[in-house]
Image (cartoon, helix red, strand yellow):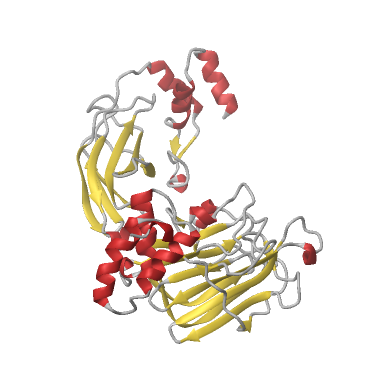
Amino acid sequence: MAGAAALLLAQNPNLTVQQLKSLLIFNGDSVSSLAGKTLTGRRLNVANSFQALAENDNTPPGTVTNFHINSQNGRALNVGWTASGDDGASGQASLYKLTFTDAISGTVIFLKSVLPSATGVTQSIDVTLPYRHTSGTLTLREFDNSGNEGAPATTSVAVSLIEGDPYVTSLGNSAALSTGGMPLALIGDDKLKLNFALPFAFPFFGQNFSTVNVSTNGNLFFSPPPTRSNGDADDVPSSSVELTKFKMISGLWDDLRTDGHAGDDVYVVIPDSSRIIFRWQAVIFGDGSNPANQPPVNFEIELRNDGTIKTRYGTGQSAPTNTNIFPVVGISGGEPDAYVIDTHTSEQNSTSLTNALSVSYLPRGVVNPLGNSDFYVDQHYSDFLNRIPDVSGLGFWTNQINECGTDQTCISIIRPLRPIVGESPRNEC
């Protein structure tokens, strides 16, 4: 590639970087095995690049017509259009790029690239919108072999919250960890327990799972986990980008080990027929020296048969427990975008989750988030104070609501007042 670029620059030293890039990537030979693996699905052809350079083409391609959604099933779309040409409506363009622009954030997300058909030919492709983006605009951009871009075609698209953004997250009071339970005998570094049977079918991102894969590095995998040739888990270091590649729950994803102290392991607790808890009693890997000298890490993930997920980090613990860690905390359906808990995630700088706030992931299709006091208070902090709740304030206001028990009259009076009038007991009216 570098040699081809040098030849083109020798022919025309005034080429910009973008012009040089376009001449190289838009004039290769189409290779079916590269479709979907590279931007253009082409193999370098320097002769074609020189031919395009000699054309001195400054005419942009035309805009496709009849750009529309043929069919939609949740996030899955079939999009169609009628191809335009290389120079206006004549000839054949070199590349289409389909993107999605989020209506709220303005984020532009690349979906797929497609090789154009001859002008006037109908085309269609299947694409899937990323999670957590429920409305926006599809844009089809068209390029010719010199890199000229035509006017894009657009169409609007929307997805229901249940299908496009299936979970609501909230922070709750710090909560004590479970005790006892069955040890999984996952003793060591990067250990993995495959196909552990769950006591119920667990719904997760639209699928029901009867088994789960458990990693000592703080993860539960519902898709095949990354594994080394010797069978060990290959899920270090923690990464919010890697989180999007697996159907998984990260309670406290870091490089952990379970051989630092007597009793270290991953434990399973089943409080009742609707819940199962996985509790990690571990240490950080640290510098790889004696694990007995590394800070302990204690936390747990609870799964409920309605799809609710909770992660807890204990109460009454003190440093060094859950310190000097680089955690990723969140859940993912195995594709963008994941639900990453920013307050609990720190990949570049060490942090502490000692007695951290608990996290809840509530499935929209099953659980009413507004019926959850933690979510209700958490949302008020976000809407009215533009920040996450402090520990004391969250505890006070949720307790005020929870004191009503099942008395709906009490709840209807307390809920509108408590989280709005202030953020801690001193502000109560």
Residue 19 in the image: x percent, y percent? 44, 22
Is residue 301 visible in the rendered image? The answer is yes
The residue depicted at 48 percent of the width and 28 percent of the height is 24
Q: Residue furthest left?
A: 66
Is residue 131 visible in the rendered image? The answer is no
Q: Is residue 339 left or right of residue 114?
A: right
Q: Is residue 170 left or right of residue 365?
A: right
**Whether residue 170 is situated above or below residue 65 in the rendered picture:** below
**Whether residue 122 is situated above or below residue 198 in the rendered picture:** above
Classify the position of the N terminus by image quarter. top right
Classify the position of the C terminus by image quarter. bottom left
**Whether residue 82 is situated above or below residue 74 in the rendered picture:** above
- Residue in front for this viewpoint, 99 or 287: 287
Q: Is residue 248 left or right of residue 232?
A: left
The residue depicted at 64 percent of the width and 51 percent of the height is 350
Total labels drawn: 0
Residue 186 image-quadrant placement: bottom right
Q: Residue furthest bottom?
A: 273
The residue depicted at 46 percent of the width and 32 percent of the height is 25
Residue 357 in the image: x percent, y percent? 51, 63
Residue 308 in the image: x percent, y percent? 41, 72
Residue 230 in the image: x percent, y percent? 70, 67
- Residue in front for this viewpoint, 303 or 89: 303
